[in-house]
Image (cartoon, coloured by chain):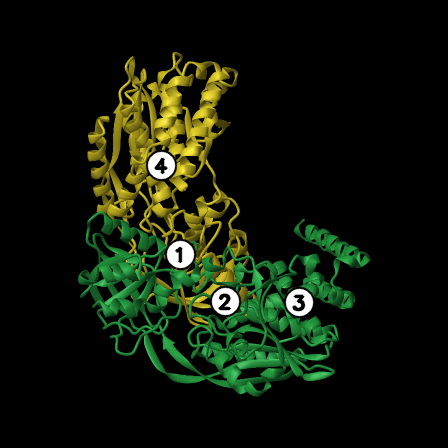
Chain colours: A yellow, B green
Amino acid sequence: MKIILKKIIFLLLLLFIGCENRNPTNLGKIALSYQQESKKIIVATLNDSVGFNRVAELCDTFGPRLSGSENLEKAILWIMQEMKKDGIENVRAEEVMVPKWVRGEESAKMLKPWPKNLAMLGLGGSIGTKSNGITAKVIAVSSFEELATRSNEVKGNIVLFNVPFDTYSNTVKYRVRGAIEASKHGAVASLVRSVGTFSMNTPHTGNSSYEDGVKKIPHAAITIEDAAMIGRILENGQDVEINLKMEAQNYPDVLSHNLIGEIVGSEFPDQIIVIGGHIDSWDVGQGAMDDAGGCVAAWNVLRILKDLNIRPKRTIRLVLWTNEENGLRGANSYRNKYLDKLKDHILAIESDAGVFKPSGFGFTGPDESLNILQDIGTLLKPIQSGVITKGGGGADIGPIMKEGVPGMGLTVESEKYFWYHHTAADTWDKLNIQEFNQCVATMAVMSFVVADMDIRLPK
Amino acid sequence: MKIILKKIIFLLLLLFIGCENRNPTNLGKIALSYQQESKKIIVATLNDSVGFNRVAELCDTFGPRLSGSENLEKAILWIMQEMKKDGIENVRAEEVMVPKWVRGEESAKMLKPWPKNLAMLGLGGSIGTKSNGITAKVIAVSSFEELATRSNEVKGNIVLFNVPFDTYSNTVKYRVRGAIEASKHGAVASLVRSVGTFSMNTPHTGNSSYEDGVKKIPHAAITIEDAAMIGRILENGQDVEINLKMEAQNYPDVLSHNLIGEIVGSEFPDQIIVIGGHIDSWDVGQGAMDDAGGCVAAWNVLRILKDLNIRPKRTIRLVLWTNEENGLRGANSYRNKYLDKLKDHILAIESDAGVFKPSGFGFTGPDESLNILQDIGTLLKPIQSGVITKGGGGADIGPIMKEGVPGMGLTVESEKYFWYHHTAADTWDKLNIQEFNQCVATMAVMSFVVADMDIRLPK
C-alpha cells in the first residue's frame, strides 16, 4: 500500500515537473537553460536509497564521532574508500590537529531534599571532579545578571543556570560561558538547563569555555525537567544538594582530517563550488542529524552527478570538515590551506541544520548574486525547496566567508532540530528518506547550476 | 499577552455556556435540570489553580511513588492531611499489603561491535544479575513465533524482543512475558524494545512476570533507537555482545494504603459513586501523567464540590488505589473489603490515561445507562468533553466492574501518553493547566449528576 502511494506521489511529481516544463514562464532566465538537467538530477535523487542507507551504515558502524576519537578517524577512512569506489575525483584526507576531550564516567545525584539520579552530560572541554565528586548546595539563577546580584550566595555552592530556551544564541551562552561566570563568583561547579526546545528528560551536551585567570570548575548539563524541578523546589524554600562526579579530561591535540573529493570542472577546473558538512559529532547518540546526514547528503550530490555523467564547467568540491563541534579546527585549517585559492572559490554551501524537509537556502553575498541564485531556485519549485533568503551560511564555511567567499546554508524545517541536537537521541531513525533526498536534490541542483552557468557568480 | 488571551477565551467560554442555556434543546432531558449546577462547577473548575499546583507539590516533594517505597507512603500521608484540610469527609487510609521490588544500580553496555552505553530500565519484578553482570551475544527476534523458530540459536545468549509498537496490548506482551519465553529456549537474559510510540532514547519500564517451573532470568528494556540499531547491525551480519548488570531485588510484601475520602450523599448515603486513580507509580520520573494527575483531578472533584457547597443525594467516594503498577493489590483489596456493598456501588469512574485534553468517557454497563450518561454528557459540550462511548473502564475499577458495577474511564487525547508512560520523562511539566482543569470539570459534572439525579443508574 505504502509503495503504491509512493509511486503515485512520484508520478504526480513527474507530471508536475512536466507541467513546469510546459510553462517555462515560472522559471528564471538562467534556470530556463537547465530544465532538463535539473529534472534528471531531481528524479535520480528522489529515487535514490544509497545515500540514505549510507547514513545508517556510517552511524551504526562507527557510532558517534567526537574529535580525537578512533571512531571519527575510522569513519573518515571508510568514507574515503567509499568515495573512491563512487568514482569521485581527487579524494584526499588533509591533516588537521584537533583537541581531544574524553568524557569518562559521570553522574549527578540530587541528595536533598530527596534522592534522585539526574540525567546529565558533562560539557565538552570541562575538567572532571575528584573521584568522590563535588557535593554542594545549589543556587539557581535565570541570568548572568541575577548571578551577579546574588554573588554573596554563590561561594562554595553549585550554580544552576535555569534558563528556558529562547533563541539558540541567547540561551547557549550559559552553556559556553557558564563555568567562567559561576567561577568568578566562587562556585565550585556549574550546571546548565539543557539547551533544547523539547525534552524527554534529555540532557544536551555541547562545547564550553574557560578563561585565563578564572579558576576552572566542572560544568555539565542537566535536563529541562530536572532543572525546572530544582527551580521549583528552591522557590518553595527547600535546600537542594547535589553530588556531581565527572571523570572528564582534556588531552594533547591529536591528528584528524578534513576529507575532500571533487568533480573537476570541464572548463574552469580552478573555480570551486564548495559543498559539505562536518564529519565530527558529539560523543553521544550517532550524530545523525548533526551532521552525518548533512555530510552524506553533500557527498551524495557528487555521487549522483557522477552517476548521471553530468560534469559542470567549474569544480564541485565536497569538504567534510573535522572538529566543528569543539574547535572549528577543520574549517580554519581549510581556510589557511587554501587562502591563496579563495579568490576562485565561487560559492560555499553548508548543510548543518539537519536533513529535515528543505525549503531552500540562506545566502550571504552580493545582491546581484542573490538574484542569480533566486533565479536558479525556480528549478526547485517542484520540490518546494527553492526559496533563497538573504543572510545565512554556516560554522564551517564561516572562515572562508570572512575572506570574501559567498556562502549559503541549506534551510530546513527547524522544529525538531533542537529536540535532538547534541543528545543521545540524535540517531538515524530520526531521518526520513524523502526529506533526506530532497536535501540532496536541492543542493545538487543549486551547486550544479552555479558550477555550470555561463556567468561567474559575482563576489 | 498570554493572560489577556486566556481571559478572552474564558469570556467566550462563559458566553458559549450562556448560549447553551438559552438554547436548552441541545441538552438532554436529565441534563436540563442540571444546567445551573453544571455551569457553576465548570466555571469554578476552569478558574482553579489549587489542584494543578498540588500535582506539582506532590511530584516535587515526594518524587516517584513505587509500591513498597517510603516515597509512596509519605505521599499518601500528605494527601490524607490535605484532604482533611479541604473538609473532605470520612478520610481514611485502608491497609493493603503490596510487593516491594527495588531496582538498585543497573546498566547495559554494548561491547561489540563497538562500545556503547545503552540507556535501559530493568523491568518491574525482574531478578538481578551477579555483580559483574551477564555478558553474552544478542539474538534479536520480532515475535514469540520467530523465537520458537530460532530456538536452537538461543541457548546461552541474550534475547532481544525488537518489536515495534503496534497497540499497547499487542506489544506489551513482550515486556510482560519476555523473560518467560526467552528462558524456555535457554536464554540467559532478555531485553525488550521499549513499549512506547516516540523516543528520545527513552527507556520505558513496566511490570513483568515469571512462571513456575521456568528459570527466572533478568529482564530489562532498552530504547527504541538502540533496539533498532542492534537489529540493523545483526541483519548486516555482525555480532552484538552486551554486558547487562542489574542489582534488582524482590523483598517480602510491605504495608501500603488505599486512600479514601467522601462527600456523603444527603438522601442515599449508602449509594456510592466511586471516582479515582492510582497513587503509586513507577520509580522513575515523577509518575505525573501516570497517575498523579488522575489522582489529583479526582480529588479536586470533591474539593470543588465542597467549596461550592454542592452535596449530591448519593455519596461521591474518592479512591486512590495503591499498587496498580505492579500488582493491582489496592484494587483487589478494595473489591474484597467492600464486596457486600458493591450492590450499592452505582458507578465507578477512573482516570488513568493521563490528564491530556479530555473528550468524554468510555462506559461499560447496560445500554439503558449509556443513554442516561450520554444525556448527562450534553452538559459537557461547552468544554467538548461530553462524548460517552460504549466500552471502557480501567485497571483499578476492573475488579469491582467484574462484580457488576458499571464503570467508565476518562478518555483523553492519547497521542503522547505512550511517549511518557513509565519513563523518566513522565514529569509535571508535561501537564497543561487548562487540560487538567477540563479533566476535573468533566469528571465533576458527570459524577455529581449521576450522584444527584432522581433515577438510580441501572446496573
Give x and y (percent) for residue B231. Answer: 28, 52
* Three-letter residue code for mark 1: Phe
User: In this rendering, do the residues under marks 3 and 4 share a single chain?
Assistant: no
Mark 2 or mark 3: whose residue is earlier in sequence: 2
Q: Secondary structure at mark 2?
A: helix
Numbered label attached to residue B165: 1
Which residue is located at x 41 percent, y 27 percent? A407
* Three-letter residue code for mark 3: Leu
* Three-letter residue code for mark 2: Asp
Mark 1 nearby-residue class (10 Å; few <14, some 14–19, many ≥20): some
Chain letter of the residue beneath label 3 in the structure image: B
Task: Judge depth for marks 2 and 1 and give the one in front.
Answer: 1
In the picture, the quarter occupied by the C terminus of chain B is: bottom right
Mark 2 nearby-residue class (10 Å; few <14, some 14–19, many ≥20): many
Q: Badge 2 is on which residue?
A: B290
Question: Which is nearer the eye, B367 or A303?
Answer: B367
Which residue is located at x 35 percent, y 30 percent? A45
**From mark 2 to mark 1, how far is it between C-alphas?**
19 Å
Question: Which is nearer the eye, B153 or B295?
Answer: B153
Q: Badge 4 is on which residue?
A: A294
User: In this rendering, do the residues under marks 2 and 1 share a single chain?
Assistant: yes
Q: Does residue B49 appear anywhere in the picture?
A: no
Q: Secondary structure at mark 3?
A: helix
**From mark 2 to mark 3, how far is it between C-alphas?**
26 Å
Q: Does residue B213 appear anywhere in the picture?
A: yes
